[in-house]
Image (spheres, helix red, strand yellow):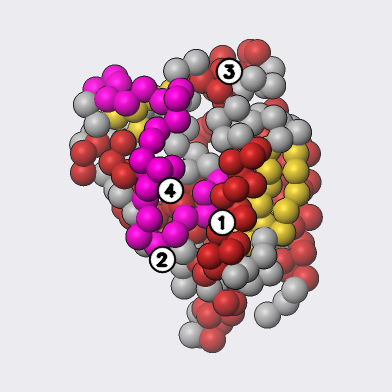
Amino acid sequence: MTIQFLIVPGAGHLAKAYSPLASALQNHGYKATIASYPSLNAPNPMSATCAQDGAAVRVLLLSLFEEGSEEEPKIVLVNHSYGGMVGCQAAYGEHLKGRRDAGKSGGVIGIINMAGFPGKEGVSLMQASWGKSAEYVRNNQPAPGLCEVENPVEVFFHDVDADLANETVKLLRPHSMNAFATPPGPSATTEPALKGRLAFLKTTEDKALSPTDQDMIMEMIENMDGVKWLKKEIQTSHSPFLSKPDVTARILEEWGLYFEGLGW
């Protein structure tokens, strides 16, 4: 398979938390790589930024194009929650058409956000949230400049098997507040070449980012950018990668094959 999936986690989650989804994609015959970024449990949280997160994921993305595969890598980014702001800026300028035109091999063929913020250049997550943290976020905990989630099982994993939910809680870490207060760079979602190659998976039982808020965010983004996103719904919490990894993988596969079928 030439299609590969690059999963960009949401805030507070170690990469290993997304292993069930990566395994499900691998069972379907696809390579799946899980990214990480420096604002998670940052040793110097006051200096961590959203732009640095995007740059870190970009390094990983570029490495996937250089692995020496016999088949040209066609990457689908799968961004979760805050990871949407990170992954979308990481992919900027790296779509397959542009890279081919520049004589390079491989590229991004589509972007999928799972309950994720697409992000706008120059607009931080806090600005997009009207300057307020979610009610379940505890700022400056467990140390200044970091934040963590109160009762993460209820917020993130309320429909996940109890044992798996409790194990996944162990994979959560504090997150830099400054990453949410600093803006991302340019987003690949604004590039004309990716028009028709953007998809949003709405989580209808979400207690972290309500379905209403998801609808509002997507309506705002579509109106600002003048680009329609493909959309599907899944009846899960904020964490479809845990509660329904196989169903989620099938949705990602369908979109990935659709993106590939558009050609370039």
80 sits left or right of 176 in the view: right
Q: Amino acid at mark 3?
A: Glu
Q: Which residue is mark 2?
A: 186
Tell which circle, 3 or 1, labels the residue nearer the N-terminal end. Answer: 3
Residue 174: x %, y % from top left: 36, 27
Q: Is residue 197 visible?
A: no
Tell which circle, 2 or 1, labels the residue nearer the N-terminal end. Answer: 2
Residue 154 image label:
3
In contact (CB < 8 Å): disc 3 and disc 2: no
Foreground pick, 227 / 40: 227
- Residue 135 on the magenta span: yes
Residue 128 image label:
4
User: Secondary structure under badge 1?
Assistant: helix
Magenta-colored segment: predominant secondary structure: loop
In contact (CB < 8 Å): disc 1 and disc 4: no
The magenta region covers: 114-143
Tell which circle, 3 or 4, labels the residue nearer the N-terminal end. Answer: 4
Residue 97: x %, y % from top left: 59, 79
